[in-house]
Image (cartoon, grey):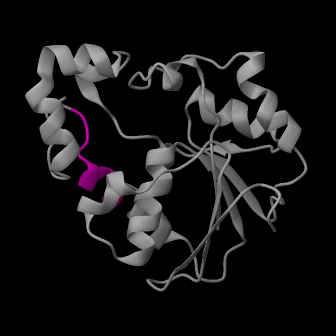
Amino acid sequence: MTLVSAVLGAAARQPRFEDDRPLGEPDLRPAREAAGRVDPGGLVVAAPSPRCTQTAEALGLAADPVPALAGAATGRWRGRTLEEVAAAEGGELARWLSDPAAAPHGGESVLDLCARVGGWLDALPADGPRVTAVVEPDVVRAAVLHALGVPGAAFWRLDVEPLSVTRLSGRLGRWNVRLGRPSAQ
């Protein structure tokens, strides 16, 4: 399993809770430059967001969208900047960042996201093809927590850079994690 974190778009640089804005050419340039350095192997999938599908395309990967790999649903915070949410709901934002079971925005909690992504990982057949997935950084975090059996409280302690590559080897509840960049094979 190879997880590739999508490139940053203008929404992520602001920072803004995802709102499915398409990426522009300057956003995609790093992915185009990395094209050919990600060996797709067998099955290639992507989160259904424009950011992930466009990143996959820019990397030269023909990816099928997989709804289970979508970034966390952020409810009423979707499309708002972090600054806007902090000003209007600072206490709720702090709770969401410190309590992995909290979902004050009306969307998914960190634990919900981890369970969804973990369920998808666990459903992969033991003898299935190698999988390459282009996903949001929060999905990479959720997959790593699940693979290592780490509590949800560690979610925000993982920094996931754009176009970083995270490899999971093994299956059926026994995973190993390897971190790298697209040029690392």
Q: Quadrant of the C terminus?
A: bottom right
Tell me, yes or no, whether the highlighted magenta stretch contains residue 113: yes
Point 18% across, 40% down: residue? 96
Tell me, yes or no, whether the highlighted magenta stretch contains residue 26: no
Toward the right, the furthest residue is: 36
Q: Quadrant of the N terminus?
A: bottom right
| 103 horizontally vs 131: left or right | left
Relative to 141, does residue 42 appear above or below in the rendering?
Answer: below
Point 29% across, 17% down: residue? 83
Q: Hey, which quadrant is residue 49 in on the image?
A: top right
On the question of residue 46 being in view, the answer is yes
Q: Hey, which quadrant is residue 130 in on the image?
A: bottom right
Relative to 20, does residue 7 appear above or below in the rendering?
Answer: below
Looking at the image, which is closer to me, 149 or 86?
A: 86
| 11 horizontally vs 75: left or right | right
Q: Where does residue 20 sit, x and y in percent of width and height?
A: 51, 21
**Magenta segment, prevailing SS (helix, strand or loop):** helix
Relative to 48, does residue 129 appear above or below in the rendering?
Answer: below
| 18 horizontally vs 127: left or right | left
Looking at the image, which is closer to me, 94 or 144?
A: 94
Q: How many marks?
A: 0
User: Which region shows up in magenta?
Assistant: 107-115
On the question of residue 68 being in view, the answer is no
Q: Where does residue 157 sit, x and y in percent of width and height?
A: 36, 56
Toward the left, the furthest residue is: 91
Point 27% across, 22% down: residue? 77
Looking at the image, which is closer to me, 45 or 110?
A: 110
